[in-house]
Image: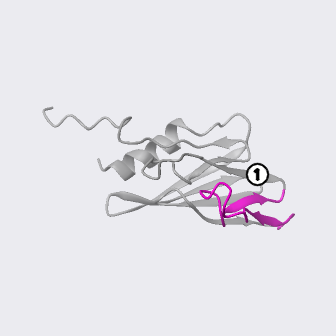
Amino acid sequence: MKIKTFLFLSLLFKCINFEAQNIQKIVASMKGGNISSIEIYTEEYVFVLSENGYVGSISSKQLNGNLDYFDNESFEKEKFGKLKSFGAIKIEYWLTSNERDARYGKIKTIGTIDLDYYDSFNYEPENSEN
């Protein structure tokens, strides 16, 4: 199993908090044995995450609210130019000074949905002897 696939599967099955947000469904698109995107459907919104864990798009049946972006390049550069909020839903990003960290600049929360990523230290390779 490739590490990207492992990262996204762990994202799907372990790191999403289902209690606080009414998630209707999650769709993972596969290409060549790797996950190419993840779609998270809630009551009002559809969030699409790219294979790298970044927001690909956000859509809604009704756009109720404004899109707000982080616009201060010198403060928290991991967030610069990224979506800050979508209407009343706030989006937070992992803040880490290590650019090689698997979570660097990636989404931490979308509203009440928590996301986490595994890095190479948390990754356990498949046992090829079995």
In the depicted structure, whether residue 7 falls above or below residue 58: above
Q: 112 or 23: which is nearer to us?
A: 112
Task: Look at 67% across and 48% down and name the residue there.
Answer: 24
Q: Residues within 10 Å of mark 1 (few under 14, many from 20)?
A: some
What residue is shown with label 1? 90
In the figure, is residue 53 to the left or right of 110? Answer: left
Task: Look at 32% across and 63% down and name the residue there.
Answer: 32
Stretch in magenta: 62-87
Q: Quadrant of the C terminus?
A: top left
* 64 falls in the magenta region: yes
Q: Give x and y (percent) for residue 90.
A: 76, 51
In the figure, is residue 118 to the left or right of 54? Answer: left
Q: Kindly identify the amino acid type of the residue bearing the numbered disc 1.
A: Lys
Q: Give x and y (percent) for residue 129.
A: 12, 33
**Chief SS of the magenta region:** loop
Q: Give x and y (percent) for residue 84.
A: 73, 58
Q: 15 or 32: which is nearer to us?
A: 15
The local secondary structure at tag 1 comes to strand
Task: Look at 58% across and 43% down and name the residue there.
Answer: 115
* 97 falls in the magenta region: no
> Going by the picture, which residue comes out furthest to the right?
64
Q: 4 or 82: which is nearer to us?
A: 82
Q: Give x and y (percent) for residue 12.
A: 52, 44
In the figure, is residue 11 to the left or right of 113? Answer: left
